[in-house]
Amino acid sequence: MLKLEHLGIAVSNLAHAEKLYSTLLGSAAYKQETVSSEQVTTSFFKVGDVKVELLEGTSEESAISRFIEKKGEGLHHIAFEVDNIDNEMQRLRDQGFEVLYEKPKPGADNKLINFIHPKSTGGILVEICQEKS
Ligand code: CMX
């Protein structure tokens, strides 16, 4: 894996959380984006080389809404950038990790994404992402 790309934080009210994080980080969000396939609206901040992604579910069935219902707002996933997501998925499967999607999906911020189930990573949902060319 190349680097930590972003931290994903589940929030129940994006406008409210965006205001809070703008004040906390001392800089404004640089992008808002809805990813319909993931049922989320996101807001991105840059902190040095790493991003913070705030995520609000767009429906009650979204992974974010389900997470907040079970655990409350908070850190939802950590995302690592990779240079070849297909190779990385195969490498992780070969090592016994539960890779969630059969194929990478389009994600926010011009990325192809996939996830590793928290049960196979000691309790942290891990995303792998590759910049779309
Ligand atoms: N971090 C840590 N643990 C988590 C978790 C998370 N983000 N989400 C769920 N869990 C826990 C659950 O609480 C549950 O724990 P217990 O068994 O101890 O109660 C366990 O994982 C298993 O849960 P599950 O019943 O198999 O599945 P869920 O319905 O809770 O869904 C998951 C979990 C990871 C499969 C689902 O959230 C998913 O498909 N995630 C990938 C997609 C996603 O997160 N999209 C939103 C982000 C999109 C983006 O970044 O653009």
Image (cartoon, rainbow, N blue to C red):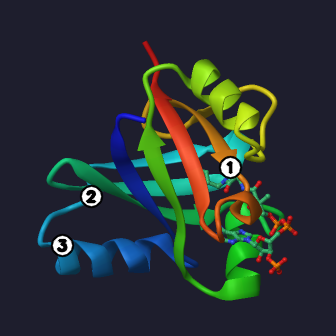
Q: Which amino acid does label 2 sit on?
A: Ala
Residue contact at pointers 3 and 1, CB within 8 angstroms: no
Residue contact at pointers 2 and 3, CB within 8 angstroms: no
* Helix, strand or loop under label 1: strand
Left or right of residue 80: residue 69:
right
Give the residue displayed 42% in from the left and 72% down from the top: 15
Q: Quick check: is the Cβ at mark 2 less than 8 Å away from ligand 1?
A: no
- Tag 1 residue: 116
Q: Where is residue 124 drawn, in percent x and y?
A: 60, 66
Going from the N terminus, do you reach mark 3 or mark 1 first?
3
> Where residue 126 is drawn, which disc sits there?
none
Q: Which of marks 1 and 2 is in front?
A: 1
Screen quadrant of the N terminus:
top left
* Helix, strand or loop under label 3: helix
Q: How far apart are marks 3 and 1 (CA)?
A: 28 Å
Q: Where is residue 110 drawn, in percent x and y?
A: 45, 29
Give the residue displayed 78% in from the left and 47% down from the top: 98
Q: Where is residue 36 drawn, in percent x and y?
A: 68, 43
Other-residue count near label 2 (Cα within 10 Å), few / some / many at <14 / 14–19 / ≥20: some
Q: What residue type is labelled 3?
A: Leu
Q: Quick check: is the Cβ at mark 3 less than 8 Å away from ligand 1?
A: no
Give the residue displayed 67% in from the left and 80% down from the top: 68
> Where residue 25 is drawn, which disc sits there?
3
Q: Nearer the viewer, residue 14 or 79?
A: 79
